Image (cartoon, coloured by chain):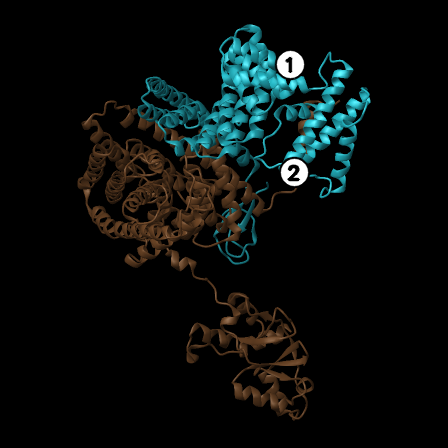
């Protein structure tokens, strides 16, 4: 930048500094612009001051950190003794010296949480989460706060972040614990779909704690994920074949999956290690279902045929019971589609010499299903269901 | 292949050819340099205060009562001696000195005042005196800016503008809040919305804050609780907080200013008793409540999170007010920015505690009131409504808070002004020996506009078809020396009375005015044009048509020097003869 001199009064250019202005005769003249040398000098000073400030601030921060560390250690000690209020004060002192230290802020947040000062805890946690969104502990604490306030969706989101977040030690165990906490939360709040997802994630996680497996299998049963429940119970039984609750759980899972033979076997095992009436009833039910089921393994064609006819008969009986408890002739008032089904049933059941064949078995099963559909459509909830028939037809439908 | 030396010489040649930066661009660049320098100095200032704090009052564990009394006394005395006897330019309020630089000394602030302020306030605040580092930082920034302005040989106009730029940088770095810094300087130092300097102020404030955060970290001063307005009825409580803040600030001004004046009149060694007295007072207050010592940011943070009961908050606030008042009266170096925030916050928190006990409806947490209270005492004392609102907004980063803060601060300012019309800074500047324009004076529009003086009728306009005799009759009737002739729609010329008279004398009275007299071209003006611009035109033309901006061919009025005299209230007999000299000059030019 070249140096230029300007009159302050009339703004005309002047020859040199201090010269009289030839236009207005003024002497108030200043120099405009700075010499490159001066510019370089100012920049050099700036760099120098920057460096000196850096050194000064660095030594300040080092001492500050040292002082903060002393308070932090005192705070940790108070925290381990359960003296949360004192720990909070020490954490605050530590933060006075190192305001931007996330460890101190986290310590303070944990102490505040322990002292049940939830609103202040959340302020620190939110700030910490901005700095480190993947922190497991921060997300976990936020999840607990959200759950406490009934913000379930937010809590689930934080729990998920915590599960997939960073954990310094015992990461797998912590994640398992968090998932179980999440499962508890979802169970309490009745979020079934989310609960199922969490349970499946837990199943996939792989763990060897029998208590956890038992709880998990039980929840899977409750959420109707029977195949996973059955496999967990199977693994429990593999390690302890005399586990009554595992037998019962397996039996229930297999029962719902339609494997009545397996279910009956495990009910019987359950009964062996501790008899009770409900299990006995379950065994009896399984027996009746197996006797009715025309698709069981190892049954001859004639037997299958007979069972299929029996199915049709019982389905028609159920239909008639639901439509007309007095037992009057139903053909008249029936709609055409129902009348047709009824006609085919009569034809099948009243045949003089019925011939057993796979096609006939299939036809009967279809007929029974049609009757069952009509019956369940017409039946009142108070009508007594034919439970074995219901299970067999449900299995066939699957 | 080129050698490094060759590349360097090439670059040097390129730089010689590159266009030299214009003054405005240089000014903007200089603003950044000022911001960086101010930021660096404020970082050193902050670190020095902290160091001293650690090695004085914070090194006493367990606290020793005697030393607790001794440190503020010794620190205050040393600082007082330094700024009153070694570097006298560093005493007094930073804001007053910066204003003086803008209005009285062409931007000149001696650099030794920066050094004096640095050392004096470090000694004072670092030993537990309850003053704030923001105002000293403001003066240091202004001093640095002034030095750089002198080094770079800025024009007088730019030199006047440079002090507020440094001031914004200083306060921005100290308070870690650039928006508040910009608004505070615009409101309190410049007291006008000057677009020409706003960009530079913003640049310097932001640069300073960036530098400060670079070295000291960017964690906020307070962990602010989430603000929630429970119900609109709560605004009444916020208004009460504002009223209380306004009353306190007015009473603070009313009682400290005369006592400060008396203290300043003390002579010789008696004056040295003042900082001793202030230090002992601060020490005593610190013995009762150590929270009142120093700037007290962490106490405000604690108050936001219900760490103290309401009666303790009120006690802190009152003790701090007394201690700060004592320091202010006795001339202990340090600023009032942080203490006002502290007192307001404690007041808000205390009243919130009372409201929770006695208010029949649901109220927000104490933290919300602490946050809103921050700006009330500040608004009442500094009379800076915008910065007081945006300060809380910048701290809380909540939109919801705006309404309660506006309510509280507006009440604070109204009540404070009602009780005590002049602000603290007007008095203190006067006591420091400056006769600065008040905020009100500076806020008044500096100029009259054409619309304030123009005649809104068309009496001075004649058609081009009227006769010369008719034109002379009109001139006689109006007592004017010139008339406008509308030669075509939207085109006006002017005629001189002497030429009209001469034409009548020569027997051209029956001719049309454009044929009998020479009608001269002129320029037009507009109603919103500042008066000084119009007067420059009137130096050449005796009468100006005032055209509409919506339709330039439509005349909304006329303007003569006589109109301007009338607008300024100059009596007719005192007015210079209108028209003759001007008409001649204009005629010569035409």
User: Mark 2 — on which chain does it sit?
Assistant: A
Snapshot quadrant of residue B49: top left
* Observer-nearest of B169 and A198: A198
Q: Residue A100: x and y, percent?
A: 44, 27
Q: Residue A50: x and y, percent?
A: 48, 29
Check the picture and name the quadrant holding the C terminus of chain A: top right
Q: Residue B506: x and y, percent?
A: 64, 91
* Observer-nearest of B178 and A357: A357
Q: Is residue B529 visible?
A: yes
Q: Give the color of chain A as drawn.
A: cyan
Q: Give the color of chain B as drawn.
A: brown
**Disc 1 vs disc 2: which is toward the camera?**
2
Snapshot quadrant of residue B270: top left
Q: Is residue A331 left or right of residue B247?
A: right
| Rendered position, B560 above or below A252 | below
Which residue was labeled with disc 2?
A323
Q: Residue A170: x and y, percent?
A: 50, 14
């Amino acid at each position: 930048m070249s140096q230029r001199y300007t009159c302050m009064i009339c703004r005309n250019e002047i020859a040199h500094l201090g010269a009289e202005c030839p236009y207005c005769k003024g002497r108030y003249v200043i120099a405009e612009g700075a010499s490159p040398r001066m510019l370089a000098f100012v920049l050099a000073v700036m760099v120098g001051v920057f460096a000196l400030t850096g050194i000064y601030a660095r030594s300040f921060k080092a001492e500050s950190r040292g002082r903060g560390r002393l308070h932090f250690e005192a705070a940790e000690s108070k925290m381990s003794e359960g003296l949360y209020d004192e720990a909070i004060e020490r954490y605050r002192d530590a933060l006075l010296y190192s305001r931007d230290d996330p460890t101190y802020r986290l310590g303070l947040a944990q102490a505040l949480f322990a002292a049940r000062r939830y609103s202040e805890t959340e302020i620190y946690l939110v700030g910490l989460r901005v700095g480190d969104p993947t922190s497991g502990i921060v997300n976990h604490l936020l999840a607990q706060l959200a759950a406490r306030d009934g913000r379930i969706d937010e809590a689930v989101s934080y729990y998920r972040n915590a599960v997939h977040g960073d954990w310094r030690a015992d990461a797998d165990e912590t994640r398992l614990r968090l998932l179980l906490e999440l499962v508890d939360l979802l169970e309490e709040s009745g979020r079934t779909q989310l609960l199922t997802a969490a349970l499946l994630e837990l199943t996939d996680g792989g763990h060897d704690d029998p208590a956890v497996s038992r709880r998990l299998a039980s929840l899977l049963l409750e959420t109707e994920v029977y195949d996973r429940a059955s496999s967990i119970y199977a693994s429990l039984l593999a390690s302890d074949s005399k586990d009554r609750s595992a037998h019962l759980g397996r039996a229930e899972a297999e029962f719902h999956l339609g494997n009545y033979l397996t279910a009956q076997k495990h009910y019987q095992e359950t009964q062996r290690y501790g008899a009770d009436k409900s299990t006995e009833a379950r065994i009896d039910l399984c027996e009746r279902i197996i006797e009715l089921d025309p698709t069981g393994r190892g049954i001859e064609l004639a037997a299958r045929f007979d069972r299929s006819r029996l199915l049709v008969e019982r389905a028609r009986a159920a239909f008639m019971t639901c439509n007309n408890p007095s037992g009057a002739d139903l053909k008249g008032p029936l709609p055409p589609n129902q009348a047709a089904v009824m006609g085919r049933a009569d034809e099948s059941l009243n045949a003089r010499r019925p011939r057993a064949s796979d096609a006939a078995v299939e036809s009967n099963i279809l007929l029974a299903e049609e009757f069952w559909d009509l019956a369940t459509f017409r039946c009142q909830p108070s009508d007594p269901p034919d439970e074995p028939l219901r299970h067999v037809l449900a299995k066939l439908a699957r | 292949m080129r050698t490094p030396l060759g590349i360097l010489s090439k670059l040097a040649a390129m730089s010689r050819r590159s266009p030299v930066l214009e003054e405005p661009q240089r000014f903007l660049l200089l603003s950044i340099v000022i911001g960086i320098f101010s930021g660096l100095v404020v970082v050193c200032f902050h670190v020095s205060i902290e160091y001293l704090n650690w090695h004085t009052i914070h090194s006493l564990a367990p606290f020793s009562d005697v030393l607790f009394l001794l440190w503020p006394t010794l620190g205050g005395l040393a600082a007082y001696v330094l700024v009153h006897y070694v570097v006298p330019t560093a005493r007094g309020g930073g804001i007053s000195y910066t204003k003086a630089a803008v209005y009285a000394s062409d931007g000149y602030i001696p650099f030794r005042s920066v050094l004096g302020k640095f050392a004096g306030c470090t000694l004072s605040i670092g030993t537990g005196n309850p003053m704030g580092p923001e105002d000293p930082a403001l003066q240091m920034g202004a001093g640095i800016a002034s030095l750089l302005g002198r080094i770079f040989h800025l024009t007088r106009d730019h030199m006047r503008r440079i002090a507020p730029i440094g001031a914004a940088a200083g306060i921005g770095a100290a308070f870690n809040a650039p928006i508040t810094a910009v608004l505070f300087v615009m409101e309190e130092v410049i007291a006008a919305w000057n677009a020409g300097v706003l960009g530079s102020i913003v640049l310097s404030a932001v640069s300073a804050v960036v530098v400060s955060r670079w070295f000291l970290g960017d964690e906020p001063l307070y962990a602010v609780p989430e603000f929630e307005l429970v119900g609109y009825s709560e605004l009444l409580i916020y208004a009460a907080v504002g009223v209380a803040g306004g009353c306190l600030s007015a009473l603070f001004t009313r009682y400290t200013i005369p006592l400060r004046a008396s203290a300043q009149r003390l002579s010789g060694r008696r004056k040295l008793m003042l900082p001793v007295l202030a230090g002992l007072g601060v020490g005593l207050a610190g013995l009762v409540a150590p929270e009142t010592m120093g700037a007290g940011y962490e106490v405000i943070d604690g108050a936001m999170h219900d760490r103290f009961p309401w009666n303790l908050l009120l006690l802190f606030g009152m003790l701090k007010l007394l201690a700060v008042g004592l320091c202010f009266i006795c001339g202990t170096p340090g600023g009032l920015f942080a203490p006002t925030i502290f007192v307001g916050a404690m007041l808000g928190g205390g009243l919130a505690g009372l409201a929770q006990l006695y208010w029949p409806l649901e109220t927000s947490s104490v933290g919300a009131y602490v946050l809103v209270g921050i700006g009330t005492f500040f608004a009442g004392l500094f009379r800076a409504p915008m910065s007081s609102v945006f300060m809380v907004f910048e701290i809380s980063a909540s939109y919801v808070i705006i309404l309660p803060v506006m309510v509280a601060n507006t009440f604070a300012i109204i009540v404070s002004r009602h009780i005590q019309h002049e602000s603290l800074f007007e008095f203190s500047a006067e006591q420091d020996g400056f006769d600065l324009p008040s905020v009100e004076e500076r806020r008044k529009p500096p100029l009259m506009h054409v619309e304030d003086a123009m005649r809104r009728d068309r009496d001075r306009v004649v058609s081009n078809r009227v006769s010369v005799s008719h034109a002379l009759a009109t001139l006689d009737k109006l007592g004017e020396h010139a008339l406008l002739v509308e030669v075509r729609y939207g085109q006006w010329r002017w005629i001189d009375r002497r030429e009209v008279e001469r034409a009548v004398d020569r027997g051209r009275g029956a001719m049309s005015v454009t044929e009998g007299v020479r009608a001269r071209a002129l320029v037009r003006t507009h109603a919103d044009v500042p008066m000084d611009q119009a007067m420059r035109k009137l130096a050449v033309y005796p009468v100006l048509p005032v055209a509409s901006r919506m339709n330039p061919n439509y005349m909304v009025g006329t303007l003569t020097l006589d109109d301007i005299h009338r607008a300024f209230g100059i009596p007719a007999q005192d007015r210079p003869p209108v028209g003759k000299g001007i008409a001649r000059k204009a005629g010569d030019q035409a």
